[in-house]
Structure formats: structure tokens, C-alpha cells
Image (cartoon, helix red, strand yellow):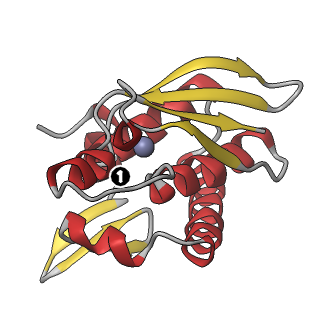
Amino acid sequence: MLSKFLQGLMFVNQFTIDNGQVDILGNKQLLLPVQIIELLNDKKAYDFIKQTVKIGMDEEIRKIGSTTPLQRFNNLKDLMNTFGIGNIDVTFIDSKKQKAMIQINNSTIANYYISQRKKTTVPVCVITKAVLAGAFSSFFGKDVDSEETKCMSLGENYCQFSIK
Ligand SMILES: [Zn+2]
């Protein structure tokens, strides 16, 4: 079942699946197996994904018009659900100080590491961390970074991200 946001994008031709091509807001998309994240678990991947998402979220405003910060967050939530990253919730936000805390209760990436019984001593959700850093850099209009302060792969009940 497509979310309202994606149905809306489809209606204005900003989400298309045609001739082997998936396009969202003018960007080509690939659906890949979760195992790929083992190749994307470093600072270089973080920086690249953060920058790509920031540009994408800035473009969103240009292509679908201005919306409220809450609507933008809900659009991000929809997209992260659609891409299978997990269901995000804001537990704290201060737009003036450009800080936020985000929680994910069902991280696909952490669950993958747990299912593979891979031993880790550090949080593993680098892609999620990068997507949040890029999106909130766009939301706040200021470059911010994201740290994963709790991760299910380390035995916590949820993953938590501090953005500032
Ligand atoms: Zn995690």
C-alpha cells in the first residue's frame, strides 16, 4: 500500500515506475538487498549519502512547493518507510537550536546484523544516520550531523539518533 505522500507524487508524475526505471522527484532509484549495507558502513558512505539526501530534500521543496516543517518531516518518514529503513519518530526537536532526537524501533539494518549474528562494538545504522543528517540539514537550513547514540545491534530496544 503506497503512502499518501507517494500517491501524491505519483499523481503529479514525480514518482514513476516505467520500462525498468524507478524515478522519485527526478532521481533514479534502485531497490537492493539489505546485505549491500556492509559496503556502506564508513565515513565516506556517510558523507556521500548525507549530501545526496540534503540535495534531494532541498529539491523536494522546489518541485512540490513549500510545506510546513511537520509536513516535510512526515514526507521524510514516508520515504524512509518506503525505502525500508524503518519507522522513525521524533522524540525531541528544537528548530531554533537546530537539534533533534530521532528513534527507530524496527531498524532493518540493525535487525540484519542481529540476524547474521555479526559481532559489533559500534552502532551499525550508518545509512540511517546519514539520511537523517542530510534531511535535517535541509530542514534546519544549516549543516548538522547525526550520531547514533543507541543501536539495537548493541542490545538496546531501539536505535536513537542525536542530530545537531
Ligand atoms: Zn542502529
Which type of secondary structure does the marked residue at label 1 adopt?
Answer: loop
Residue at numbered disc 1: 12
- Kind of residue indicated by mark 1: Val
Residue 14 image position (x, y, % from top left): 37, 59
**Residue located farthest toward the right when viewing the structure as drawn:** 97
In the image, what residue occupies the spot 34% across and 27% down? Answer: 105
Quadrant of the rendering where the N terminus is positioned: top left
Q: Quadrant of residue 22?
A: bottom left
Residue 60 image position (x, y, % from top left): 56, 53
Q: In this rendered view, identify the residue nearer to me: 111 or 119.
A: 119
Residue 148 image position (x, y, % from top left): 57, 42
Q: Please tell me how crowded label 1 is: few (under 14), some (14-19), or many (20+) other residues with Cα within 10 Å.
A: few
- Callout count: 1
In the image, what residue occupies the spot 63% across and 26% down? Answer: 101
**Left or right, 69 with reference to 83:** right
**Left or right, 7 with reference to 100:** left
Q: In this rendered view, identify the residue nearer to me: 155 or 75.
A: 155
Quadrant of the rendering where the C terminus is positioned: top right
Height in image: 147 above or below 29?
above
In the image, what residue occupies the spot 51% across and 52% down? Answer: 122
**Left or right, 51 with reference to 115:** right
Q: Ligand 1 shows up in which quadrant of the image?
A: top left
Height in image: 96 above or below 31?
above
The answer as to whether callout 1 falls within 8 Å of ligand 1 is: no
In the image, what residue occupies the spot 69% across and 28% down? Answer: 100
Q: Can residue 37 be seen in this snapshot?
A: yes
Residue 151 image position (x, y, % from top left): 44, 38
Q: Can residue 68 be seen in this snapshot?
A: no
Q: In this rendered view, identify the residue nearer to me: 85 or 110.
A: 110
**Residue located farthest toward the top when viewing the structure as drawn:** 91
Q: In this rendered view, identify the residue nearer to me: 136 or 47.
A: 47
**Left or right, 16 with reference to 153:** left
